[in-house]
Image (cartoon, grey):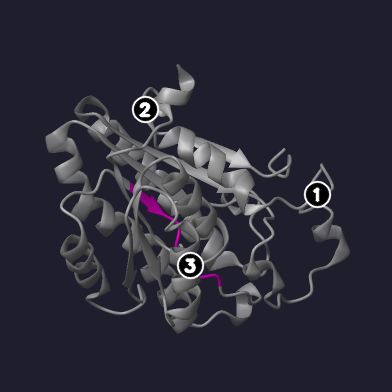
Amino acid sequence: MLTEKLDLTGKTAVITGSSQGIGEAIAALFAEHGASVVLHYHEGTEQAEKVKNNINKHKGQVYMVQSDFTKPGSIDQFYDQVYKHVKQVDILVLNASIQIAKNWNELTNEDFDKQIQANFKTSLFLMQKFAPAMAERNWGRILTIGSVQQIKPHPAMIAYAATKSAVLNIVKNVAMQLADQGVTVNNMAPGVIGTPRISEPVPEVEERIMQRLRTPSGQIGDPEDCAGLALFLCSEAGRFITGQNIFIDGGMSL
């Protein structure tokens, strides 16, 4: 039955960027379905503690690991800290990212490098770290959180959109190589979701361009709209889906 295939009891999930927004919703739903969860946060423990306390009521264990993925050595540090808490990782959700909103001709080298490091390089090298053990056990799930900007880039977020497109290419490449080892690799691409990020200032965009960026449904999505698909893809129910890019965007990608 589908309900049984969605059960994550006995599985451990690492979810980056899970102290708020989409990552928080995914962590909570995974825990509700039995998984032990490693929460990742960038800075400050207060919000991460709130998330941990909220999902502690479920049967799985909840752990917290801090890491700033823009810093050199952060990937090794994060990996080592995760394995101080857990013995194995079955599910890796790569949700953490940095979005610097500037007009394309105002973007600096530092702006570009931060987004490449946190969004692109971190995704690749965390896969390198965690995937081998999954392949050895012949079971694993890797899910990257992309963006509708992969195909509809926002004019004020040129580097962010480029990193999301690059990560999708990694997903397809790695998925092909791990498919016969029981490990699926997929990308989920949200549109406009009601998270703290949408309140961040963005440079004004000409109306003629904004027309192309609007959501046909006329709605803004909720983090929970993303969590359900994440659960499906990262459970036994999603075993035959790999190398795919799936939009959750109210039709924005149309």
Quarter of the figure with residue 38 = bottom left
Drawn side of residue 110 relative to residue 158, left or right: left
- Which stretch is magenta? 92-99
Distance from disc 3 to disc 2, alpha carbons, whole Å, reads: 26 Å
Write the residue at 48% across / 67% down. 19
Distance from disc 2 to disc 1, alpha carbons, whole Å, reads: 31 Å
Residue 128 vertical position relative to residue 186 in the rendered view, above or below: below
Q: Is residue 184 visible?
A: yes
Q: Secondary structure at mark 1?
A: loop
Please give the residue where the numbered disc 2 appears in the rendered image.
Answer: 236
Residue type at mark 1: give it. Answer: Gln
Drawn side of residue 125 relative to residue 145, left or right: left
Residue 181 vertical position relative to residue 44 in the rendered view, above or below: above
Please give the residue where the numbered disc 1 appears in the rendered image.
Answer: 219
Residue 77 image position (x, y, % from top left):
21, 72
Please give the residue where the numbered disc 3 appears in the rendered image.
Answer: 19
Residue type at mark 3: give it. Answer: Ser
Distance from disc 3 to disc 1, alpha carbons, whole Å, reads: 24 Å
